[in-house]
Amino acid sequence: MVLRRNIFLTAIALSLFGIVMIYSASSYSANLQYGDEFYFVKKQILAFIVGVTMLLICSKFNLVILNKLKWPLYIFGIGLLVIVLIPGIGSSVYGATRRIDVGFFSFQPSEIAKFSLIILSAGIISIHPPLTVLNIFITMIPSIIMCVLVMLEPNMSITVCIALTMAIMTIAGGLSYRATFIIGLTGLLSIPLLIIAEPYRLKRLMAFLNPWDSPQGDGYQLIQSYFAIGSGGILGVGLFQSNSKYLYLPFAESDFIFSIIAEELGLIGCVITVLVYIIYITTGFIIAIKTHDKFKSLLALGITSLVGIQTLVNIAVVTGSIPPTGLPLPFISAGGSSLIVFLAATGILMNIESSNRRTCFEC
Amino acid sequence: MSEKLREMATSQYLRALPITAKRGDIYDRNGILLAGSNTVYTIYARPNSVKDKKATAIQLSSILELDSSIINNILEKNVSEVKIKTKVPKDKALQIKSKDLSGIHVVESIDRVYPFGEFLTQILGFTNIDIRGQTGIESKYDNYLTGADGYIYTMTDVSGREISNTLPLSKAAIDGFNATLTIDYHIQAILENTVYKAHQSHNARAVSCVMMDVESGAILGIAETPSFDLNDIPRDDASKLLSLSRSKTISDVIEPGSTFKILTAAIGLDSGAITAHTTTNCPGYNIVDGVKIKCWRTLGHGHQTFAETVANSCNVAFMNIASRIGTEKLYSYFEKMGITAKTGIDLSGESSGIRIPATSVKNVDLARIGFGQSIALTALDLLVSSNIVINGGKSVVPYVLEYISDVNGNIKYRNYPQITNGIMKSDTSKIMINALEEVVLSGGGKNAAVSGYRVGGKTGTAQKYENGVIAQGKYISTFLGFAPVDNPKIICLMVVDEPTGAYYGSIVAAPYVGEIFREVLPYLGVIKNTVEIDKPVIIMPNLIGLRQYQVYSTMKELNIYYEVVGDGEYCKGQLPVPGEEITNDVIGLVSF
């Protein structure tokens, strides 16, 4: 019961905190661009309502049915990823085609697809544990297909998140040390290849190593992020007092919202935010461990890992610890589809926790 | 790290508008303002913050009297900040301020004004568009005159739009220091007038006049023509501006001619090469190493005492004096007295003179240097070197800045007189002062005489050289004068470059120094110490048709000093004309 409450309250708290921070980060730019300082906030609130509804549905949903629906869901996800690549359907931003626009609302297929893959993989691994080479391939093929499609957008950061989540799930499913080592090494070796394939990645990498070399070019965003974090110091400049939001920091309300948190609420605000994430993730792992049903356990692990990895990568990017990539901060960043699926996934986590207790009552 | 980032971030978020610091004033020694600053206003726009560009342009155009389409074009520019108009007077600036137009800013700035316009132009100098000193005092003491600008900071977004809910911060400007010069406005005005008059009367290429305080080296005035109004600087023609704004007194090197004889004579006496009793015979020429060098009076001066050689300005006598001194001694005096060296005046652009290296001086050169040829120096150097001779042998370093003071009158910097004793013997000085008074009493300096005052001086007429050859008909006429003789207070050098018509220093330069002294000496409170006597009126005789020696004896009898033009046998023309009523203090002009 405590686990279920923890998961629920942290997810809701992060989402609401996100709405406040989105207002702060976007009111100025939204007013300039759309003439409405609540433009992004309204969209986020709508997504929050939909997301909470999804959370409630998912927390009651019979998970056996979900297991049965794993292939249709996966194919649906793959379908969306294919559709986004068809010229004229996906909308291009900064050289990448990542969104599908359906008139009143646009979403990122990869946000939905990555959860369909987690469900599928949890299903496969629970039936075919990765103990034989054949089983490993069966597990990996759907992941590889999805990664390739996401890379075609291109969206390297989501790919990395998916790959890492899959790795964790596979290892938890019983992968041997030897296989872990070999697959891990292959993965590491593929990174330089991916960088060579798209020169912009190398430039971004250089910009991350020394942003001051091109303060108006590739280093600009990171420098602005540093300015925000540095200005915030320990206590922050105060809620709504950010200067970076006056168009200095691009994507302040989405990928770089953590910089605004750091600027306005300082190190203390950052630490508290991270602590809430830690509670969520720890709770998620405890649920996964406590779950005896293999499918549900792996599903809980996958969802929790994805939230953890995405949070870690996002914070690492805005603090300049790894090369910049566009990845939203779960629950907080502006972005409807992201918030809805994370809330829905939270519902599934709660569902798993409830079903554990039901099973216990039965036994 | 955090502090540094915060600082960098803040400088990025803030846009600064300057508050120009008031530039210091420049005053004469009496506290009369020579260069000051007016507060004017600059109208800036931040185009991104201007809400209704058309309406704003129309409002501004009616106040600023500018075409509204021009203003509109400025407002349409895609820049964060742009100047609309500079030098806007206060009433218009206030009108704009009261309209409270979004994105339009009124900022105070400084306009340099020179109350007397074309006055002390080359010495005062001027400032550039940013009100930083470019020439003269404005440039030399720029660091003192310029204060530190202040700023008004406003928070803006990345494209320069102001963020409305923040309060502007500001940092006050620190005003510049004031400069007080050694220049005396009244004396300068007299010099300016006289120089202008001389320039007009003789249709000269250029005229300059400098006056110095004998004992301290403080420059009391420097006037030069051609010149220009400092409030209307001819910036369109760079080379013209350069030549007009350069002080010829300190940067142009001239061959001094007879004025230099003051120095030759003094060195001769001081080194013991001659005495006040040395006599010379002038046959009208001298032969040095087989070269015949003529005296200006080809007829010769005959036997002369030392005082007469100076009064007659006899070239032969000065060739002899130089030969007696010898190159080594002469050059050691040049060294001691700073002849052909820079004087060290506190102005930029001073030139040093030119002299033949001591080892290359032939006897012919030595003879020529004796009467002021084959050597060149700046007018200021000639003045300062001659000053040693009449100042009891003490040298001074000339200066134009008296002191720098802050707004409250506290002295921040001061120039003190730099006097070196014993450059020459005081006896030498006494003999020279008397000899130079004689020049004004009975020689070529007569025109510089001032009734009631004892004035000394020396004329000079030098032929100009162009590309190493004598330029026919081009002369530099000079007169160096000082007063009063019993205790010299002021020394003055007048240089008339390329006068047309008459060119003798006695006629072209000396009268103006006389005019200057006539006004300056009473102004300085020098008490008249000679009795004014009415000179007897004489009738100018007819000289036409007389032979040279006949003219000489006639004029000597009447005690009239005269200059000679041409070298014919018989007199062809004369001034004053026959029958004119004159006194013997006129200077005659006789052509042969």
Image (spheres, rainbow, N blue to C red):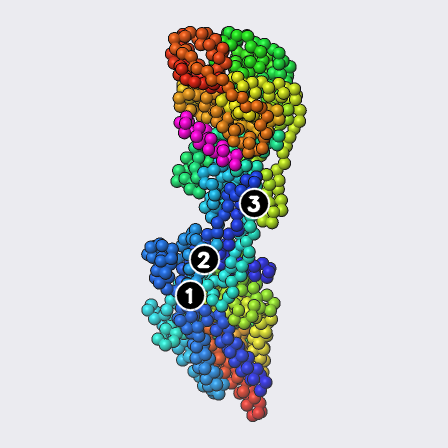
Badge 3 marks a residue whose secondary structure is: strand
Q: How far from the left and from the top, in percent, is residue A210?
A: 53, 56
**Tag nearer the camera, 2 or 1:** 2
Image coordinates of residue B541 in percent, x first then y, are: 42, 12
Residue B263 visible at all: yes
Q: Give the mark toward the camera: 3 or 1.
A: 3
Residue that label 1 marks: A154
Is residue B323 in view? no
Q: Please check the rendered image and state whether residue B549 is part of the magenta-colored stretch, yes or no.
A: no
Q: Earlier in the sequence, mark 2 or mark 3?
A: 2
Distance between the Cα atoms at labels 2 and 3? Answer: 27 Å
Q: Is mark 3 in CB contact (under 8 Å) with mark 1?
A: no
Amino acid type, residue under disc 2 in the picture: Val
Q: Is residue A264 above or below residue A201?
A: below
How would you rate the neighbour count of disc 1 (Cα within 10 Å): few for under 14, some for 14-19, many for 20 or more? some
Rendered-image quadrant of the C terminus of chain A = bottom right
In the drawing, what numbered circle is on residue B178? Answer: 3
Question: In this picture, which residue range is highlighted in magenta?
Answer: B186-207
Q: Nearer the viewer, residue B327 or A312?
A: B327
Residue B2 as seen in the image, left or right of residue A198: right
Q: Chain of mark 1?
A: A
Task: State the residue in front, A303 or A329.
Answer: A329
To the question of a shared chain for discs 3 and 1, the answer is: no
Q: Is residue B200 magenta?
A: yes
Q: Position of residue B78 (x, y in %)?
A: 39, 57
- The CA distance from mark 3 to mark 1 is 68 Å
Dominant secondary structure (helix, strand or loop) of the stretch shown in magenta = helix
Would you name the residue on which mark 2 appears?
B106
